[in-house]
Amino acid sequence: MMNKVVRVLLCFAFFGVSLANAEQYPSKVITIIVPYSAGGPTDTVARLVGKAMSGPLKTQMIIENVEGAGGTIAGTKAAGSAPDGYTLFLHHIGMSTAPALYRKLPFDPQKDFEPIGLIGDVPMTLVARKDFPAKDMKELIAYVKANKDKVNLANAGLGAASHLCGMLFMSALQTEFTTIPYKGTGPAMNDLLGGQVDFMCDQTTNTTSHIKAGKVKVYGVTTRKRVASLPDVPTLQESGLPGFEVAVWNGLYAPKNTPKAVIDTLAKALQQALTDPSLIQRFAELGTDVATKDRATPEALRAQLKSETEKWGPIIKKAGVYAD
Ligand code: ASP
């Protein structure tokens, strides 16, 4: 039997070590897993946030793009990572749509992660290759209906926001057309610019500069209100698609069982990062609303994930879109 003195010493040693670890966090580079290709909207947000958080955390944050299957490969990897605060996961609205889209989702977005905080909200835009025949939304609807066997829409795979938006567009038009999945809308945008695909619904993070440079045609924004950085672009609701609304939100997560002290440190760093003037300016240029301090919290992201999962589940089930 262990004598009392030894037990007390061991106890001190244990708490001493865990206290030292908690105090030292972070003591090495932190990786943020991003579920889509480099150069796309989610990647852009992650790089800006990672850079801004590295100041308050006093450590480097690197991005790992784990592409494919609409974000589910990355989600599975992130959920199974060590819960030590050195592997995080940055995802968007796809965290709330995946449970309805994937019959065999290998992770549970609400149970397998510790939310850290919301990052911001991003509108989407419906854009087409520069020489696409339709000049406005009315013409686009008529053209797509008349040419449904010819037109194609690029997306970042089942579970991506670009997929969700395209699916809602098809259902609003009651017309099905071909979709072409990419590993992210970064590479999809390259093909749209090259004229290999016809149109795409994508976040302003990825479309604003091309819209402003006249390299793509824009038909509308998916939010209820117009976007400040694109004041001349009508909303899809204004353009004849009543009730059409998708707003993408981004959140930062850690694997389940990451210690609370670590989550609190990360949430604080996120809140600080979101007040960084250069991040705020870049987000504004990209049409993205930065989350307010009260939304950049574990509680707010947990609540958002729950309510969005409840919102999108029935819509997706009704649309009858599934992956096996
Ligand atoms: N966020 C994009 C989407 O959902 C994909 C990407 O970031 O590349 O379509």
Image (cartoon, rainbow, N blue to C red):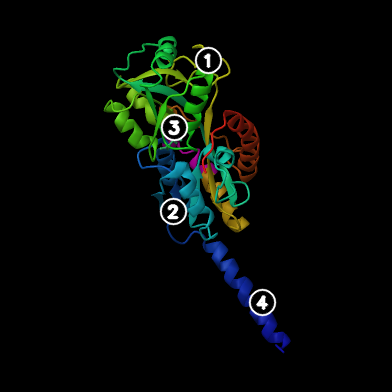
Residue at x-position 29% and y-position 22%: 215
Q: Amino acid at mark 2?
A: Thr
State the image coordinates of residue 222 (x, y, percent, origin top left).
Answer: 50, 22
State the image coordinates of residue 141 (x, y, percent, origin top left).
Answer: 44, 14
- In this rendered view, identify the residue nearer to me: 287 or 123: 123
Circles 1 and 2, Cβ within 8 Å, touching? The answer is: no
Circles 3 and 4, Cβ within 8 Å, touching? The answer is: no
Label 4 vs label 1: CA separation? 65 Å
Secondary element under disc 3, as helix, strand or loop, is helix
Q: Which mark is residue 241?
A: 1
Q: Which mark is residue 31?
A: 2
Magenta stretch secondary structure, dominant? helix
Q: Amino acid at mark 1?
A: Leu
Label 3 vs label 4: CA separation? 48 Å
Q: Which mark is residue 283?
A: 3
Secondary element under disc 4, as helix, strand or loop, is helix
Q: Which quadrant of the figure has residue 22?
A: bottom right
State the image coordinates of residue 53 (x, y, percent, origin top left).
Answer: 46, 47
State the image coordinates of residue 6 (x, y, percent, origin top left).
Answer: 67, 85
- In this rendered view, identify the residue nearer to me: 125 or 149: 149
- Mark 4 and mark 1 lie on one chain; the one further toward the N terminus is 4
Q: Which mark is residue 91?
A: none
Q: Is residue 189 above or below residue 174?
A: below
Circles 2 and 4, Cβ within 8 Å, touching? The answer is: no
- In this rendered view, identify the residue nearer to me: 197 or 298: 197
Label 1 vs label 2: CA separation? 41 Å
Circles 3 and 2, Cβ within 8 Å, touching? The answer is: no
Q: Residues within 10 Å of mark 2 (few under 14, many from 20)?
A: some
- Mark 1 and mark 3 lie on one chain; the one further toward the N terminus is 1
Q: Is residue 291 above or below residue 297?
A: above
Mark 4 lies within 8 Å of ligand 1 (Cβ measured): no
**Which is in the foreground here, disc 3 or disc 2?**
2
